[in-house]
Amino acid sequence: MQTAIATVCLAGTLNEKLEAMAAARFKGVEIFENDLLSFDGTPAQVGRRIRDLGLEAVTFQPFRDFEGMPEPRRSKAFSRAERKFDLMQELGCDLLMVCSNVSPDSLPEIDRAAADFHELGERAAARGLRVAFEALAWGRHVNHYRQSWDVVRRADHPAVGLVLDSFHVLARRSDLAPLRDIPKDRIFLVQMADAPKLDMDYLSWSRHYRCFPGQGELPVADFMDALNATGFDGLLSLEIFNDSFRAGSARSVAVDGQRSLLFMLDELQRRTGRPVAGVPNLPPRAHCRGIDFVEFAMDETAAAKFEQTLAALGFANAGVHKSKAVTRWRQGGINIVVNCEKEGFAHSYNITHGSAVCALALKVDDAGAALARAGELLDQPFRQLVRSGEVYIPAVRGLGGSLLYFTDDRTDLGRHWEIDFDVPPRAGDGAGAGLTAVDHVAQSMHYEEMLTWLLFYMSLIEVHKTPVEDVLDPGGVVRSQVVESENGALRLVLNASQSQHTLASRFLNDLFGSGIQHIALATDDIFSTVERLRTAGVELLPIPENYYDDLDARIDLAPGALERLRANNVLYDRQGAGEYFQVYTKDFDGGFFFEIVQRRGYAGFGSANAPIRLAAQTRLARHPAIPRR
Ligand code: MG
Ligand code: MG
């Protein structure tokens, strides 16, 4: 399989786009005519630049409104095509992509379209070129891949082939069965795109909302399975029209594109058990067994205050790093690391972002394999010097420049606490507040980054995504996307907002970038935990009376249950027989806070309560002096 990417996917000048593609290890590029026209130089110079970067121009596009034109427009269409052929020969590209005619003047007869393509094939072949036909979902007479295939079949010319575009095929919910019977050598080009499910006209949907495979909601895997049934091993190219991508960094979007292709083709290999030519043999996605630790970067003043809070939350000081200003706090299966080093990664993170979570460590089956997969997927490995005798923990760069560490139980990584940490003489008694594990981690990010991090996690770790939810914040709408592992060991909530006034956005401003905004800790008994926190002086987010009145009206609760929730500022949700209880701490410097949750057979995240919680946090931020009940 030869993979490629279209210039239309990326922002920047043609030269910037090409450099970004080469840096992201692409070999093939689809040249959009507009990018060529806006280039300050001849097509031959563009061709040389492409080859100098180790790329190949695999397609030139688009050629529009060609087939089925009445005279004299038919003759004009052919002379237009000849001019494109001249240009392609100068450029060094042998395939012209023709999309189906949208002109109201075009004729409906399929034999006429086929005859036009036969002639175009003759003219192309005379120059050693080829043409490929794509059915636009909004084409006038040809808008389905079965129709474009019919035209190509009847054109019956070796220089005329078919384009299959996953967006056009899947947006129309076309039956994929006939696709499996198309001879593979008649498919000249496959264009890949995913998209969110939206109820809008095909043209606007396609031109603005396409995204990379795996980022959207179209059944891309079904398309790939059907394509695979043909034995297709030709040209597979990303063709994404997306407003955010075209406003983003060309380099980062190109890397996302390569990652999405590798992930998609790796999944195909795993489903079929057969290697796809040209696709590396990747280790499997990392199976997460749990969150090994969460690391905070702080200065000493902030750390002293934060560690008091940790103690009040029931954490015990369980270790002091042998060579660094790093302490370990532990409760149940939760490890929190507070890093006050004056040099190195955590320090620079602290300088840039203030007190914040700088790293998340995942316990996986095989940390080395996870790092190897990350490398193949163009994730950015991170390495910091460790003293001899100390454990090197593999890591990649994650959200907002933070780190994602991998540990396992196969090597010394399973003993990094014992090897790197001394147990302090006055280790806490560990009586705790009943907190057992990290339930979920919520990350706030820029709206434009959301698809990037979604793909980052999905491609690297064995997680699936749940449908996007829009949550109401007093300052606007927050888009929320969950990625989670089947075993519940890892649940990440990705939040982003286009409004500057939501809590998620204010957090981004306070933190100078994306990062972890809250960590939810699990308890088996929320009321007992709240009782112990209250005794220890932990202030929880006050919830308004109205919430409980509404809850009473919405949900049938056992006698006394409502009073108990109200008295303890506990938010409650129910899904079927599943129950969910939540409380929140006040936020710390920089806007970070903890949530404490109890699940009883409940799979969600209390999104029905999120507007209430966000309003309560906003009220507190605006009027911190108002006495609390
Ligand atoms: Mg297309
Ligand atoms: Mg939460």
Image: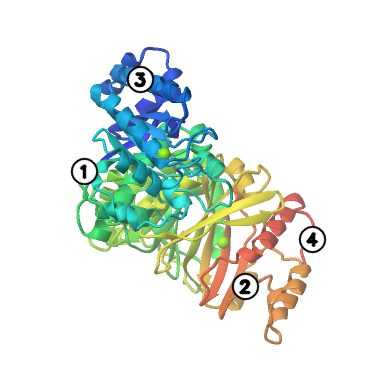
Vertical arrangement, residue 130 with respect to residue 256, above or below: above
**Amino acid found under the numbered disc labelled 2:** Asp
Write the residue at 30% across / 43% down. 153
Categorize mark 3 by other alpha carbons within 10 Å: few (<14), some (14-19), many (20+): some
Write the residue at 59% across / 48% down. 200
Which label is found at residue 573?
2
- Name the residue carrying label 1: 278
Write the residue at 47% across / 22% down. 72
Categorize mark 2 by other alpha carbons within 10 Å: few (<14), some (14-19), many (20+): many
Categorize mark 1 by other alpha carbons within 10 Å: few (<14), some (14-19), many (20+): few
Distance from the alpha carbon under mark 3 to that under mark 2: 66 Å
Q: Is mark 3 on a helix, strand or loop?
A: helix
Frontmost residue, 250 versus 412: 250
Q: Is residue 404 something one can see in this rendering?
A: yes
Which label is found at residue 627?
4
Which of pointers 3 and 2 lies earlier in the amino acid sequence? 3
Which of pointers 1 and 2 lies earlier in the amino acid sequence? 1
Distance from the alpha carbon under mark 1 to that under mark 3: 34 Å
Distance from the alpha carbon under mark 2 to that under mark 4: 27 Å
Which of pointers 1 and 3 lies earlier in the amino acid sequence? 3
Q: Mark 1 or mark 2, which is nearer to you?
A: 1
**Amino acid found under the numbered disc labelled 4:** Pro
- Name the residue carrying label 3: 82
Occupied quadrant, residue 235: top left
Which of pointers 4 and 1 lies earlier in the amino acid sequence? 1
CB-based contact (under 8 Å), mark 4 and mark 1 = no
Q: Mark 3 or mark 2, which is nearer to you?
A: 3
Placement of the C terminus among the 4 image quadrants: bottom right
